[in-house]
Image (cartoon, rainbow, N blue to C red):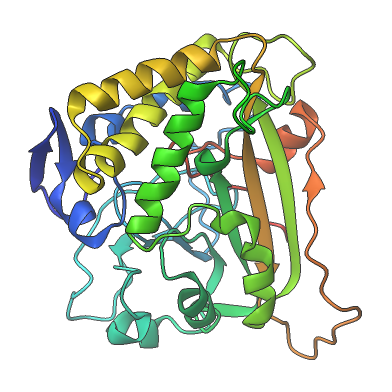
Amino acid sequence: MPTIDQETEVHFGRKFHGYSLRQSANFLPVDQITNIDVYTDNFDDDVEDDSDEDKESGADTLDPSIQLTGDIVRDDPSMIDRVETETDTDCPDARLPARITWNLNDSLQQSPLYRARRNALEVYNPVAKRWRPLLSELMGLLIRGGSIQIVEANFGNIQSSTGRLIGDDARNAKGLQDWIEMYRRGMNMLGRDPSFVEHAASILDSVGYVDVSRTIHRWHIGAWQADRDITLKEQTFDLVVQSLEGLGLWLACGVQRMSRDDFDDLLRRAVADLRRPDVQAYIEWNVIIARRPPEGYTRRAPFEDKASVGKGDDDIRHRFMKPISPVVAFKERPF
């Protein structure tokens, strides 16, 4: 997939996009960013792929890039990821290319595209660290009644159905506990909220969005065979392991100055814990949707921040489109 620049930097034996590191936009090594087929293959049976059709909806979607911080995508109604070309954000004319990258860490109002695209987008999927001001600005980009949707796996809050990630019990999954703590600490050191999804709905409500909802889907990982919300293939487990390495490498070694040997040992212990049947680890996917108020909208009830729980494979089948990374996924339009 093309990026805003072709500059790469080698750190700790892996290549990173220099732009992403400078902007604190994404920390996944380049080889992991581009190697996502295994992950999307797990959804092939559940997703209707109409990529051979030549229908154009005429609707605009602002959607995050796995490498960077945000882009505008003109796409089909089902939101299947089919990005074509990419241009720089400082293009002099007002044409809307197939894809335009924005640096969402800066105010959108600094870009001429903000003025050009106001009230034009139907759907927006954000990934950035300055959430409250960003979400407020983005409302101006949405059409009346347009939707914002955030879909994120909460790697900073991996959990255990048996309580093996709480407290200091000798039976605990100490390696996985240490990885989670390292991840949270690194995010906090960069001024990023590792648990944003847990209070995103309240932020959306506070800046003026309506019809805010949050649904949690649990992905069971590892060796345990209880009833699963989604049956993860072994290949997907391997990619979750890759995510622990890719997401943690820069935060541990680049931010917290951990040695690569120490990080490799941390990763080895965390992966061993994921495979323990008595740990019963799972990751929560949060699906958050809200709308810009339509014309004449009247709030019928006070906002209440509560989450519903997904109902397994059938629920996922109707809600998710093909994910583009271990931490970002598409969702069908809610209208």
Check the image and report above or below for 179 versus 151.
above
How far across and how far down the image is residue 175, in percent?
Answer: 46, 22
> In which quadrant of the rendered view does residue 142 lie?
bottom right
Residue 332 visible in image: no
Residue in front for this viewpoint, 173 or 209: 173
Q: Quadrant of the C terminus?
A: bottom right
How far across and how far down the image is residue 213, in percent?
Answer: 75, 60
Q: Quadrant of the N terminus?
A: top left
How far across and how far down the image is residue 91, in percent?
Answer: 18, 74
Q: Residue at x 72, y 55 (%)?
A: 214
Check the image and report above or below for 96 versus 228.
below
Check the image and report above or below for 271 versus 152.
above
Residue 69 lies left or right of residue 131; in this view the side is: left
Q: Residue at x 80, y 91 (%)?
A: 296
Residue 230 lies left or right of residue 42; in this view the side is: right
Residue in front for this viewpoint, 214 or 268: 268
Q: Residue at x 62, y 63 (%)?
A: 200
Residue 34 visible in image: yes
> In which quadrant of the rendered view does residue 143 lie?
bottom right
> In which quadrant of the rendered view does residue 189 lie?
bottom left
How far across and how far down the image is residue 28, in percent?
Answer: 30, 39
Judged from this view, the residue extending furthest toward the bottom is: 296
Judged from this view, the residue extending furthest toward the right is: 300
Residue 85 lies left or right of residue 176; in this view the side is: left
Check the image and report above or below for 306 versus 224.
below
Q: Residue at x 78, y 64 (%)?
A: 305
